Image (cartoon, helix red, strand yellow):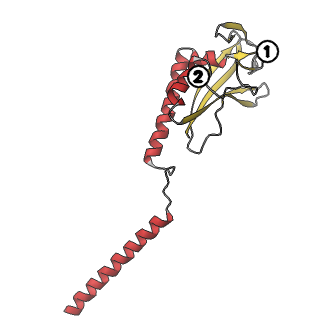
Amino acid sequence: MVNRGQAHTLEAVVAALLLLSSLVFALQITAVTPLSASTSNQHIENQQQASAAGILSIASQNGDLKRSVLYWNATGQRFHNGTINGYYTETMPTEFGRSLEEAFGDRGIAYNVYVTYTEPDGGVVRDEMIYRGEPSDNAVMASRTLVLTNESRLRTEELGLGPQIDSDNFYAPDIEDGGYHNTIRVEVVVWRI
């Protein structure tokens, strides 16, 4: 009887050691770092995407997004006071740009803003409006689409009305006869730094 009890105890100890060593092995092969995917990281990325989408939605509804898209210096072939490359590396001096900076600027969050439009041959071009660097792997994106007509007018440096847009004075070409000019997709890409 004693031998049988000792055998069961020995069997339980061996099973426990086997289970414990399996658990230790599994934990050693899994690297957990601050940037590992987790539910908290996903939650933060979802918040960033929702914030970007909210800013785009509000800016679209109150006209700030369209004013920013049309804030183009035709003679300089770039956004007003943009870099030599045509885009901003700091805050864009429009309400849309200030809203982005207020939401993300001092919180350790970087963002890029791109404008995408169609060429007459059907190709798609993606240009930078605001460029803060190469997005990381945990970047999220929100976008909004604007339809521009030939009646749309460029904005002056003071955000006043400038000339009507055409293929010669605006970055997005006129792709169709009639009143339609082009469709601009504004993308905001957000990531933690």
Please provide percent x and percent y for residue 49.
51, 34
Please provide percent x and percent y for residue 18.
39, 76
Image quadrant occupied by the N terminus = bottom left
Vertical placement of 82 versus 153: above or below? below
Residue underneath mark 2:
97
Vertical placement of 40 versus 116: above or below? below
Please provide percent x and percent y for residue 73.
73, 16
Between 177 and 193, the one lying in front of the other is 193
142 vs 47, left or right, is right
Q: Residue at x 25, y 88 (%)?
A: 6
Helix, strand or loop at label 2? It is: helix
Vertical placement of 113 versus 95: above or below? below
Between 35 and 65, the one lying in front of the other is 35
Residue underneath mark 1:
75
- Badge 1 local density, few (<14 within 10 Å), some, or many (20+)? few
Q: Hey, what amino acid is under mark 1?
A: Thr
